[in-house]
Amino acid sequence: MDLLTQIRDDMAFEGNIWKSYLYRFLMKLELWLPIWVVYLQKQRGFSLTQITMLDVPFFLLIVLAEVPTGAIADRFGRRFSLMLGSALIAVAFFIFGIADSYFVILISWTAWGFGMTFQSGADQAILYDSLKQIGREHDFERINSRIWALTSLAALLAILIGAPIAQATSFTVPIFLSVGIAALAIPVAFFMHEPRGEHDESRDQYFQTLARGIRQAWGQPTLRYIIAYSGVLVAATYTPLVFQQPFLNHHGIGTGNLGFWQAPIRGVGILSALAAHRFLSRMGQRGALFALPVTLALCYVALAGIDHAWAFGAFLGVGLVAGAGNPILATYVNKRIPSERRATILSVQSVAGNFALAGSQPIAGLIADHLGLRALFLAAGVTTLVLMSAILVLWSRAETEEQAELDELNRALYGREQARDAVAAS
C-alpha cells in the first residue's frame, strides 16, 4: 500500500468517528416516543393489552435474530448492516404511522425489532475497527461513552420535541418525521469506510455460547441468583414505564405537555447512571442491591395510592433505578467472572431481561385494562418487592456459603504453608 493510499484510508477511518456520533444521534431522535401509547389508544383504538402484546415478538426477536443478522453483517460488511437496519426501521415507522390494523402494526413493530438487530453490535464494531486501523483502539471506551451521552441527549430531545409537534399537528406527524430522520442515517452509514477485518465467528456460535453461559451461570449459585435478579429488575423497571402516557392522559395532561412530564425521568436516569459508582461505594454491593427493589416498591405504591397528576413524580424514582441498575449489576458481574467468560455471562443476562419483558408486558396490560392503572402499580410494587427480596435472600445465602468455602480453602492453604515452613526450619 502506497503512502497516499494509507493517508486516505486513515482520514476515512477518522471520519468514521464523527459519522458514528451522527448515526447514533439520528437513530435515537425518535420523535414518536412521547406519544406512541396515547396514539395507539386514541387514534387506533387499541387496548393496553393489545399495546403491550406488541412487545412480545419484539423482545423475542431481538434474541433470536442475533445469528442471521450477525451473519449478514459479517458477509456483507458492518456498513451494509447499518444501512439495512436504518432502512428497515424507517419502513417500520412509516407502516406504524399509516396502519390501522392491529396485525399490520404488529408487523411494523416486529420489523422495528428486526432492524435493531442489524444495528446491534455493528455500530460499535465499525467504530472499534476504525480506531484500531489508525492505532487509537485505546480511545474506544472514551469515544463510546461520549456516544452514549449523545444518544441519551437525542432521546431526551425527542421526548421534549415530539409531543408539542403532535399537539400542534397530529399524532402521525412526529411518526413520519421519525421516518425521515431514520432515513437520513442511511447515507451516513453509506459514506462510512469499511475497515478491513477477519470474519468474526462469535455470532456464528451465538446459541452455543448462550447455552454454555446458561450452564455456567446455573452452576454458580451467586451468578444464578444475580441473573434472575437482573431479569426481574428489568421487567419491574421498564414495564410500568410503558404506562406513563396513559397515566398522564387519565389525569388530563394534554398531548403537547406529555414530553415535558416524561423528560425529567429520562434526565434522572442519565444522572443516576453517572453517579451509580458513588452510590455503590457508599451503600456497598449488598445494600445497593436491596435498595433498588425497595425504591421501586415505594414508587409504585405511591402511584397506586395517590390519585393525582403530581403522583407522576414517583416515576422519577423509577427512572433513578433504571439508570443506576445496570452499572451496579455490571460491576458485580464483571468482578465475579473471568474475562474469558464475561461476554458469555453478559449475553445470558441480556437474554434474561428480554424474556422477562416479553412475559411481563402483556400481563401488565391485562391488569391495567381489567382492574385499572392503580391496581397495576400496586401489583407491580408488591410483586417487585416480594420476588426481588426472595431472590436477594437466596443470593445473600449463596454469597455467605461461597465466602465460607473460600475462607476454609485459605485456612487450609495457610496451614500447609505453615507446616512447610516448620519442616524447612527444622
Image (spheres, rainbow, N blue to C red):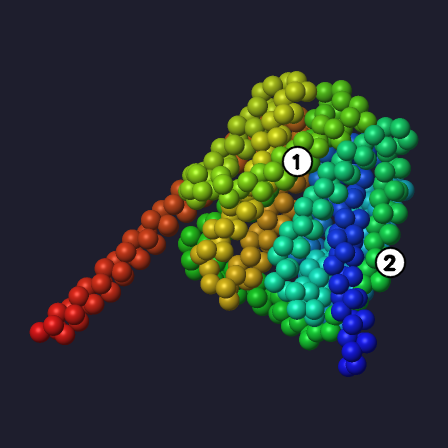
Q: Amino acid at mark 1?
A: Gly
Image coords of residue 46 (percent x, y):
79, 35
Q: Quadrant of residue 270?
A: top right
Badge 2 marks a residue whose secondary structure is helix
The 10 Å Cα crowd at callout 1, few under 14, some 14 to 19, many 20 or more, is some
Q: Which residue is mark 2?
A: 187
Q: Nearer the viewer, residue 187 or 262?
A: 187
**Residue depicted at x 36% and y 46%:** 397
Residue contact between numbered discs 1 and 2, judged by CB atoms under 8 Å: no
Q: Which residue is mark 1?
A: 267
Image coords of residue 114 (percent x, y):
76, 56
Q: Is residue 75 left or right of residue 373?
A: right
**Residue depicted at x 86% and y 52%:** 184
Instruction: Look at the image and tell me in which quarter the N terminus lies.
Output: bottom right
In this view, 274 is above or below 367: below
Q: Is residue 36 left or right of residue 283?
A: right
Q: Nearer the viewer, residue 356 or 23?
A: 23
Instruction: Look at the image and tell me in which quarter the C terminus lies.
Output: bottom left
Number of numbered markers = 2
Badge 1 marks a residue whose secondary structure is helix
Q: Tell me if residue 76 can be seen.
A: no
Q: Quadrant of residue 306?
A: top right
Q: Is residue 262 left or right of residue 91?
A: left
Image coords of residue 193 (percent x, y):
79, 67
Q: Nearer the viewer, residue 312 or 397?
A: 312
In this view, 320 is above or below 308: below
Residue found at the very far bottom of the displayed protein: 1
**Residue depicted at x 72% and y 46%:** 151
Q: Earlier in the sequence, mark 1 or mark 2?
A: 2
The 10 Å Cα crowd at callout 2, few under 14, some 14 to 19, many 20 or more, is few
Q: Amino acid at mark 2?
A: Pro
